[in-house]
Image (cartoon, grey):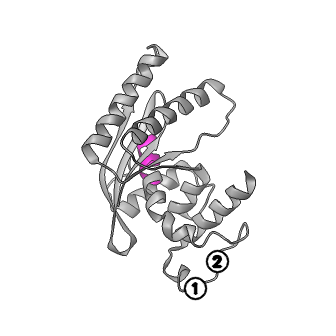
Amino acid sequence: MRVLGVDPGLTRCGLGVVESAPGRRVHLVEVGVARSDADADPAERLLTIGAEVERWLDRHRPDGVAVERVFAQHNVRTVMGTAQVSGVVMVAAARRGLPVVLHTPSEVKAAVTGNGRAPKAQVQLMVARILGLDALPSPADAADALALGICHLWRPVAARTSGTAAGEVAAPTRTTASATPAQRAWAVAEAAARRGR
């Protein structure tokens, strides 16, 4: 399976394509950042980001798209831009008949680090380790996009184990015994996020 992970942002939009391999390994296909001029008209900025996302979708032909779920922040302007970019990405994916899944930041962090509150530096380190990279993916937007893709690829294993209470890890079963600690932690974070909705 091939996934395009998108860390939405109006100035910098992280894009990362990852692919699953046997044994729950993940391979890097491409990573980058779509940028728009902060001084440009908002509609033009969305057009610029959207055009780059369209190019990535056409070039890599992913099986699905994983986008970071937007959360309210103190900076309303930042939230608005992030939400608008998310919408542009979802429309581009829907136009191609691709499924889009939204993952919360805590779900993504738990999937790649085992800790839903991990700092960005730890996420970058684990993404590099999971993908076998010689250097940390940079900037953070790019690392976050790759983490989203990894989270999405690992979701099928974790989702089957998501019936545990907050703070608990599912007892090993035929299904969960093969899940990594990070995948089990992701399942716990997902279950907690569902209860908080």
Decide: is 81 above or below 13. Answer: above
In the rendered image, residue 19 lying in the magenta stretch gets the answer: no
Pointer 1 residue: 173
At a point 65% along the width and 74% down the height, the residue shown is: 169
At a point 37% along the width and 24% down the height, the residue shown is: 48
Left or right, residue 87 beside residue 98? right
At a point 39% along the width and 38% down the height, the residue shown is: 95
At a point 60% along the width and 73% down the height, the residue shown is: 161
Q: Amino acid at mark 2?
A: Ala
Q: Quadrant of the N terminus?
A: bottom left
Left or right, residue 121 beside residue 14? right
Decide: is 173 above or below 45. Answer: below
Q: State the residue in front, 54 or 68.
A: 54
User: Where is residue 27 shown, x and y percent of the image?
Assistant: 31, 61
How many C-alpha atoms fall within 10 Å of the one at disc 1: few (<14), some, or many (≥20)? few
User: Dominant secondary structure of the magenta stretch?
Assistant: helix
Q: Which residues are magenta?
A: 139-147
